[in-house]
Image (cartoon, rainbow, N blue to C red):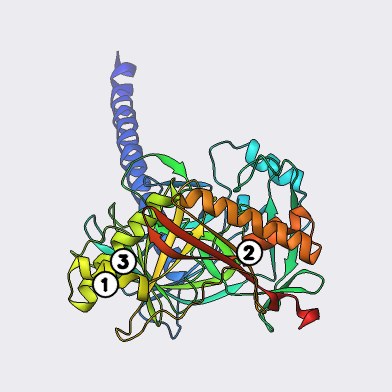
């Protein structure tokens, strides 16, 4: 019993020490977890700070490299976690990738390109850098994206996937891929020996998240902008786009070095940008129905739809609204004025939703000076068609132009398809519902060995 009493105190002490150690462990683990969370937050803050650099662009300047962590392949999703947060007025120097997470690079065959599409049904080919969260942006606002500078990679590609996509998949069961060097000193790319394409880099895809939740293909453009494929959107221009979700969620990719007005074989000169410099401003409380583009000389209004006739109707309505406000005239007067001042083009016909855009001069005294040839001239090969269905006359004009390139210049079917996609300029003259005329031209100046 004496021994038991002597052992009682150390036993209790051991138990108390054990409980104390358990409590200490719980407190320590909780504190360590909190410290870990703070540490993770600090890493994010450090990463964000390391992307901020001194530069002569407006606002805070952020670098956004294209990595597997900062890009998505072929999808938009408004639930995607932002890869960068910026304030209104900040500038982002964005890097982009080639298609399919940088897999479509010189050396990849057309069979391998096709497999990248068939192995991933529903997904677009584009690699999109973003999303970028703009602080304070919310539905009902407008995002103003100033394109300050574009520097492409050294190469680009044009291809049509055999029997898939493009304007004429059934007529082109065969396909080809072509890679070209981008000579930015001379601002040209040699498409074929003796044929040089002038370079004018622009983002084929730039836009915000749309309102609908879930994952959706990067291919069709819409009110959120996206894959507009409007070649006028070069450095020095500005995109205005409505905001549909908090933060806007801005992406860009599908980087082009050149493209026609009327992209037809699915692709332009598809490249990637070493940098596209975007200054982003938030216009609070001002909502627009469709994206708008401002150039140094024009305001561009546009429309997109699966039916090219409806796309034209939307572009016309947007243009009439613009002209009425710009010139303080009625809608009827604006509609009557539109044929004399508005220069409307087919943007593309291969992105599920087809596009039409109209350039309207800022100078209210200006009139339209663009030519609408109906037959070959000294300067242009011309494919002219007219009718009441813009889809049908666009098809007819495209086929006519490709036939001319084969007959008059000896191009192969596939090369004619590719050249038309990156160089043909399809201009709308008559735009009435029951009478439309389309004038597609390719400059003869592309054949430099004959100049």
Q: Quadrant of residue 435?
A: bottom left
Picture coordinates of residue 31, whole percent (x, y): 33, 47
Q: Quadrant of residue 136?
A: bottom left
Q: Residues within 10 Å of mark 1 (few under 14, many from 20)?
A: many
Q: Residues within 10 Å of mark 3 (few under 14, many from 20)?
A: many
Picture coordinates of residue 60, whole percent (x, y): 37, 76
Q: Residues within 10 Å of mark 2 (few under 14, many from 20)?
A: many
The secondary structure type at the circle numbered 1 is helix
Task: Tell me what residue is drawn at x 41 percent, y 51 percent.
Answer: 309
Instruction: Work out which quarter of the rendered image holds the C terminus and state it.
Output: bottom right
Residue mark closest to the camera, 2 vs 1: 1
Q: CA distance from mark 3 to mark 2?
A: 26 Å
Residue 270 can be seen in this image: no
Left or right: 150 as drawn, with respect to 309: right
Instruction: Work out which quarter of the rendered image holds the N terminus and state it.
Output: top left
Q: CA distance from mark 2 to mark 1?
A: 31 Å
Counting residues from the start of the chain, the first of labels 3 and 2 encountered is 3
Name the residue nearer the viewer: 251 or 234. 234
Name the residue nearer the viewer: 126 or 357. 357
Marks 1 and 3 close (CB-CB < 8 Å) = yes
What residue is disc 3 on? 319
Residue mark closest to the camera, 3 vs 2: 3
Task: Tell me what residue is drawn at x 72 percent, y 40 percent.
Answer: 173
Left or right: 78 as drawn, with respect to 101: left
What residue is disc 2 on? 422
Which label number is shown at residue 323?
1
């Amino acid at each position: 019993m004496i021994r038991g009493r002597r052992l009682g105190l150390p036993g209790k002490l051991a138990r108390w020490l054990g409980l104390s150690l358990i409590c200490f462990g719980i407190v320590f683990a909780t504190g360590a977890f909190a410290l870990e969370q703070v540490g993770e937050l600090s890493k994010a803050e450090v990463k964000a700070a390391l992307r901020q650099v001194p530069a002569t662009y407006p606002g805070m300047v952020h670098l956004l490299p294209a990595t597997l962590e900062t890009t998505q392949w072929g999808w938009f999703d408004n639930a995607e976690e932002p890869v960068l947060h910026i304030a209104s007025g900040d500038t982002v120097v964005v890097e982009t990738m080639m298609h399919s997470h940088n897999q479509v690079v010189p050396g990849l065959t057309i069979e391998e390109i096709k497999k990248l599409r068939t192995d991933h049904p529903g997904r677009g080919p584009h690699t999109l850098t973003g999303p970028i969260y703009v602080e304070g942006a919310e539905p009902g606002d407008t995002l103003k994206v100033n394109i300050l500078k574009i520097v492409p990679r050294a190469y680009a590609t044009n291809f049509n996937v055999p029997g898939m996509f493009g304007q004429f998949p059934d007529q082109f069961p065969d396909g080809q891929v072509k890679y070209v060097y981008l000579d930015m000193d001379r601002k040209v790319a040699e498409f074929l020996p003796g044929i040089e394409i002038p370079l004018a880099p622009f983002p084929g895809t730039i836009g915000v998240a749309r309102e609908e939740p879930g994952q959706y293909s990067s291919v069709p453009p819409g009110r959120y902008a996206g894959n507009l494929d409007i070649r006028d959107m070069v450095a020095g221009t500005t995109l205005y786009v409505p905001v549909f979700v908090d933060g806007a969620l801005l992406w860009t990719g599908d980087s082009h070095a050149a493209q026609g007005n009327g992209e037809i074989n699915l692709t332009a000169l598809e490249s990637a940008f070493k940098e596209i410099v975007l200054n982003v401003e938030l216009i609070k409380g001002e909502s627009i129905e469709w994206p708008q583009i401002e150039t140094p000389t024009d305001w561009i209004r546009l429309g997109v739809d699966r039916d090219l006739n409806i796309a034209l109707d939307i572009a016309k309505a947007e243009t009439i609204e613009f002209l009425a406000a710009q010139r303080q005239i009625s809608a009827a007067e604006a509609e009557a004025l539109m044929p004399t001042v508005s220069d409307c083009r087919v943007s593309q016909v291969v992105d599920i939703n087809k596009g039409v855009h109209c350039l309207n001069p800022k100078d209210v005294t200006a009139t339209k000076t663009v030519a609408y040839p109906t037959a070959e001239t000294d300067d242009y090969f011309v494919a002219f068609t007219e009718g009441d269905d813009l889809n049908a006359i666009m098809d007819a004009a495209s086929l006519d132009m490709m036939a001319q390139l084969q007959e008059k210049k000896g191009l192969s079917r596939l090369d004619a398809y590719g050249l038309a996609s990156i160089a043909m300029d399809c201009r709308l003259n008559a735009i009435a519902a029951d009478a439309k005329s389309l004038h597609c031209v390719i400059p003869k100046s592309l054949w430099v060995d004959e100049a």
